[in-house]
Amino acid sequence: MGRFVVLAYRAHTGGAPPGSTRTADEARVRTQAPTHVPTTNGSSGGSSERRVGPDINAIVRACREEGRVRTVFQPIVDMRTGAMCGFEALARFPMYRPDEWFQAAADSGMAGWFETTILRAALASLPDLPAGCFMSVNLSPDAIQAPEARSAFGEYESLDQVVIEITGQVDSAEAAAIADALEPARSRGARVSVDESGRGGTCLISLTTLHPDFLKLERSLVAGIDELPALQKAVGAALALAGHLGAGVVAQGIETEGEIETVVGLGVPYGQGFAFGHALPQLMAHAHRHEQTIKRLSA
């Protein structure tokens, strides 16, 4: 299997947010409950709530003005060899948190345009991808079905190095439509990844409809796994499910050597987290301090 870059720009589509695997500064672009502040409704004299975050004009400027969104990359490691096998691209924005930007774009009906602007910025880095790596780009279900995203993918003859990660929940009612929207990119070689956080993740019917190439396990299933048998059983179940689907598994949020040893022992093929490196502006495969440990554990 080749190396890959996972591009994570997450947009909120409702329901409980998936578990965060990073701090606010290094987090995957996942949405959380947005901050609200009370404001007076002048017409009624009562109070209502106003979201704190970028307004529609800021969203438009982010889409139109080059350089307002930055991309950084966090490595992903092959837990069988210890080598870096990919990167996850993360978005950085001025002033507000990533989840506030994505929520504002969704609230303004511009999720497709906004997420595709970020997508294009990341795909532009494909020529800099280290040899053998592949890139997974994360999009919300709404953005996947938007014409802007289809157009962006259509500009590339080959998407062999790209994995499209579906963010948030996908219920059975929309799974078929999303699968259809993904087909043109898949026909060019793109692969598909879904979250299996264990907390409102994609339902089983949707998984069989989408037929993903990867399942991604959130930090909530990895944190302290070396000391929690229940998490070990949960990850074992996820591995069994992935086996039935023919999918690989990526364990996110790995931070300690104990978590590394347990994840390797369970047979999880891919890992990601601060243990292997923080997000950087450059795409660069390099040795990390746990590489020899993983090789020893996998021998």
Image (spheres, rainbow, N blue to C red):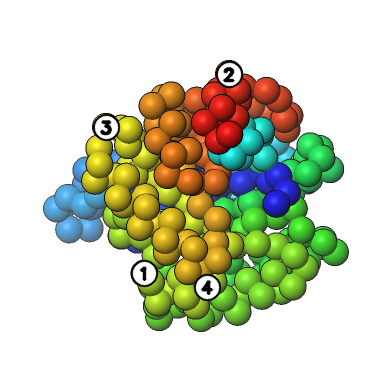
Tell me residue 274's x, y (percent).
49, 27
Q: Residue at the left extreme?
A: 46
Q: CA distance from mark 3 to mark 4?
A: 33 Å
Q: Which mark is residue 203?
A: 1
Local SS, label 3: loop
Local SS, label 4: helix
Q: Which mark is residue 289?
A: 2
Q: Is residue 64 shown above or below 201?
A: above
Q: Which mark is residue 210?
A: 4
Mark 3–mark 4 CB contact (< 8 Å): no
Mark 1–mark 2 CB contact (< 8 Å): no
Q: CA distance from mark 2 to mark 4?
A: 36 Å
The amino acid type found where label 2 is placed reads Arg
Identified at 67% across, 23% down, the residue is 287
Q: Is residue 37 shown above or below 196?
A: above
Tell me residue 259's x, y (percent).
40, 31
The amino acid type found where label 1 is placed reads Cys
Q: CA distance from mark 4 to mark 1?
A: 11 Å
Q: Is residue 155 shown above or below 283?
A: below
Disc 1 or 3, which lies upstream in sequence?
Answer: 1
Disc 4 or 1, which lies upstream in sequence?
Answer: 1
Local SS, label 2: loop
Quadrant housing residue 162: bottom right
Q: Is residue 65 visible?
A: no
Q: CA distance from mark 3 to mark 2?
A: 22 Å
The residue that disc 3 covers is: 227
Comparing marks 3 and 4, which lies closer to the viewer?
3
Local SS, label 1: loop
